Amino acid sequence: MHCAVAAVSSPIFTPSPRKMSPVFCKAATAPPPPLSSASSFFLKQIAQPLDNGGGEEEGAAATKAPQVLKRKRPGRIDIPVISLKMEEAKTKSDSDRSSEVVFEGEGYSVYSKRGKRGGDLEDRYAAVVEIHGDSKQAFFGVFDGHGGAGAAEFASNRLEKNIMKEVVKRGDEMEEAVKEGYLATDSEFLKKDIRGGTCCVTALVHKGDLVVSNTGDCRAVMSRGGVAEALTVDHRPSLVEERERIESLGGYVDCCHGVWRVHGSLAVSRAIGDRHLKEWVVAEPETKIFKIRPDCEFLILASDGLWDNVSNQEAVDIVRDLYVGVDKPETLTACKKLADLSLTRGSLDDISIMVVHLTQFI
């Protein structure tokens, strides 16, 4: 301990940064020089036990060798695990919103699932019930975006408004009203600085009629007494009529890795948007009108992410098992089952499915 005292109290001695030599240790054993009053007081203070309460023990402590104070280990910090779990759940929820959409409305259910190709979910949907306060009027749509979600987002917000504007103007000319609504939406979108395009399928319930339209390869299938009935035709370059139309306008269609494409680029021949191919990829829909009868059970609107892997009748059978003869139709569960079936069969595309209860519009 005399070595330690000499090192602390002597202002003249400066220890070498190198390891101490034997000469230094021997010299340090010599009696230390007299301590100043301040140094004596300092040593007396550090020599006191931590629990010293004063009295006679204080004087005895001063004569003992000074104790070396050990640095106390900081107390254990308890991390609030519950807060971490809450933050993790919040992050997971935010992620889920960009990869999955689940919604059940009045008379319809929607389920969308991001494809295994990755990226953001580019599909959107629209559902407007009780149009003009009429419970027997409604609009439903599924929008399959490509090259980004911009076109699908835009069309899902604007198409119903543009169609209903034309319906008010044209009255019972429903087919023409829907056509003009589609073309107006396409024209509005092309004025925006947004890339990409979108296929879509829509169903307008109006005065007891079901008005079904599509542009691209989204499809509408109705269950009529348990029998699947396709109400639309997929607009793809492989169709003879579509290929001839494109070629008559100076365009071309070729097959790339087994898929027919417009100018070797787009795998659909009609869509809203796609400015760079607009001369050949038109937004004009095909429309069919049906009277809703008691055997018209439900309608399935879905993107090609479903139809490329699941047949029309398979889809109807799965939905019907959870729709007919049950106390409460479980169409949302049916939508999820259909998406899972397509995924197990190798779908890489985004999948969007909407089931509409037609029986409530009779």
Image: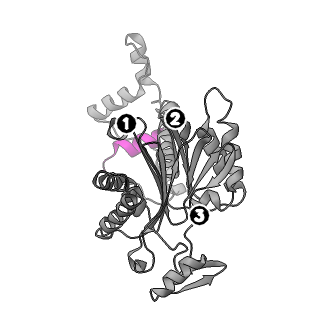
* Image position of 224 with respect to 56: above or below: below
Work out whether mark 1 precedes mark 2 in sequence or the reverse, and give the earlier one.
Answer: 1
SS at circle 1: loop
Q: Circle 3 sits on which residue?
A: 117
Q: Position of residue 295 (x, y in %)?
A: 62, 40
Q: Secondary structure at mark 2?
A: helix
Residue 169, picture quadrant: bottom left
Cα–Cα span, label 1 and label 2: 13 Å
Question: Going 52% across and 76% down the picture, which residue do you hit?
Answer: 266
Q: Specify the segment rendered in magenta.
A: 1-12
Residue tagged 2: 360
Count of all numbered marks drawn on residues in the image? 3
Q: Which mark lies nearer to you, 3 or 1?
A: 1
Give neighbour class at mark 1: few <14, some 14-19, many 20+ (Cα, 10 Å).
few
At label 2, the amino acid type is Gln
Asked if the residue under mark 2 is in contact with the one under mark 1, i.e. CB atoms within 8 Å, the reply is no
Give me the residue at 32% from left, 36% from top: 35
Q: Name the kind of residue labelled 1 in the image.
A: Asp
Asked where in the image residue 237 lies, by quadrant, the reply is bottom right
Measured as percent of width and height from the top left, residue 360 is found at 52, 34
Relative to 57, residue 41 above or below = below
Q: Residue at x 36, y 41 (%)?
A: 131
Query: Is 219 located above or below residue 257 in the figure?
Result: above
Of 264 and 22, the residue lying toward us: 264
Q: Is residue 309 visible?
A: yes
312 relative to 220 in the view: left or right: right
Residue 6 inside the magenta-drawn segment = yes
The three-letter code of the residue at mark 3 reads Arg
Cα distance, mark 3 to mark 1?
41 Å
Mark earlier in primary sequence (3, 1): 3
**Residue 29 on the magenta segment:** no
Judging from the image, the colouring scheme is one colour
